[in-house]
Image: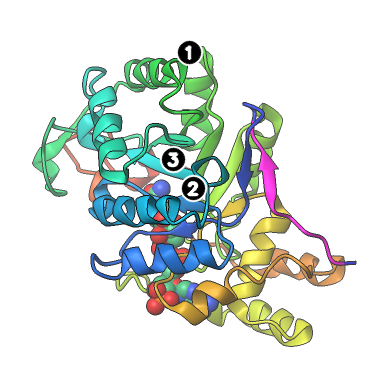
Amino acid sequence: MAKAIRFFELNTGAKIPSVGLGTWQSSPGVVGEAVALAVKGGYRHIDCAEIYENQKEIGTVLKKLFDDGVVKREDLWITSKLWCNSHAPEDVPESLNRTLQDLHLDYLDLFLVHWPVSMKKGSVGFEPENLTQPDIPSTWKAMEALYDSGKARAIGVSNFSVKKLGDLLAVARVPPAVNQVESHPVWQQHKLHEFCKSKGIHITGYSPLGSPGTGSIKTEVLKNPVLSKVAEKLSKSPAQVALRWGLQMGHSILPKSTNEARIKENFDVFDWSIPEDLFAKFSEIEQERLIKGTGFVHETLGAYKNIEELWDGEL
Ligand SMILES: NC(=O)c1ccc[n+]([C@@H]2O[C@H](COP(=O)([O-])OP(=O)(O)OC[C@H]3O[C@@H](n4cnc5c(N)ncnc54)[C@H](OP(=O)(O)O)[C@@H]3O)[C@@H](O)[C@H]2O)c1
């Protein structure tokens, strides 16, 4: 029987829409149109970040959608993220204020610490010289203050390993509501999934299609033979099957597209499901982390000498 999965409940009691539009690498000039098409087509969740450098355009479109009565603010879920150059406690509220101003909003539904990585205040780019030592407990305290203020209705993290989540939970007054991490059939994250489940932390899966537009990624998730076979059996596209897999794992998912047909295709994942026998086939897929964070590690600078340290061996 088909199962509709449209929301997941967070530990705050809020309901996060299960499919959100990704906006990383959605160029200025096209991202606004993509957001408008998505919202008009039923999406109620947009995933943003200051580092994507397109929030102003998204904000202009959101304002128009509200002004034109297409959707009400309270019916949309907007996530954004604190970039690594704003981890100092005094920079955290400033970063949120900038994002709110760019998005023309007075609150976010979810504000995430983008990476467990710190960079020099105000630094631009990914040069290793920018890397500094993160102090996640201090940054998190500042995030908690934003939660208290109501400007961020939920707070969470992104790219946190089981170890880093455990360390955070040990000091947090407000536990993270979400950990946004890479998740798709080729990087299923079972260990993190079980840990998050046991702690009431919701997983949002990023790059749910395997980020095929990212040049440095050579593995083509959408061409995986298991995915192709299941797609053929269900008369769905491999992208839809990858997305539906994420929903059935209990994750919200953030497919990015700026193409009208694919924005629609990626939202057509609610009134059917992958039956148990086919779902079991996903355990045969060889696992590989595709977004490795190599730009955040350095032999002598910053907190992590190599990607094993960044991910605490969860590779
Ligand atoms: N927290 C983090 O550190 C982090 C990291 C990465 C991503 N994210 C978030 O997650 C979102 C999604 O991840 P992502 O952008 O890396 O990759 P993705 O959503 O896995 O893949 C996007 C790529 O797939 C193409 N595509 C979209 N729908 C398709 C379909 N139905 N069939 C075939 N190709 C399709 C898109 O091209 P078209 O646009 O031409 O359709 C684009 O090139 C991001 O946009 C961002 O919001 C967060």
Is 92 rendered above or below residue 130? above
Q: Residue at x 37, y 70 (%)?
A: 217
Residue type at tag 3: Ser
The span picked out in magenta is: 2-10
Q: Secondary structure at mark 2?
A: strand
What amino acid is found at the position of numbered circle 1 in the picture?
Val
Secondary structure found at label 1: helix
- SS at mark 3 in the image: strand
Q: Residue at x 13, y 30 (%)?
A: 121
Identify whether 104 is placed above or below 38: above
Residue matched to label 2: 181
Q: Earlier in the sequence, mark 2 or mark 1?
A: 1
Numbered tag placed on residue 158 in the rendering: 3
Residue 281 quadrant: bottom right
The answer to whether one can see residue 211 in this image is no
Tag 3 and tag 2, C-beta contact below 8 Å? yes
Give residue 81's position: percent from left, percent from top. Answer: 36, 40
Instruction: Give the side of residue 92 with respect to residue 267, left or right.
Output: left
Give the Cα separation between the discs numbered 3 and 1: 17 Å
Of the numbered discs 3 and 1, the one sitting upstream in the chain is: 3
Q: Does the closest atom of ligand 1 sit within 8 Å of the Cβ of label 2?
A: yes
Residue 147 drawn in magenta? no
Distance between the alpha carbons at the discs numbered 3 and 2: 6 Å
**Kind of residue sitting beneath label 2:** Val
- Horizontal side of residue 165 vs 308, given as left or right: right
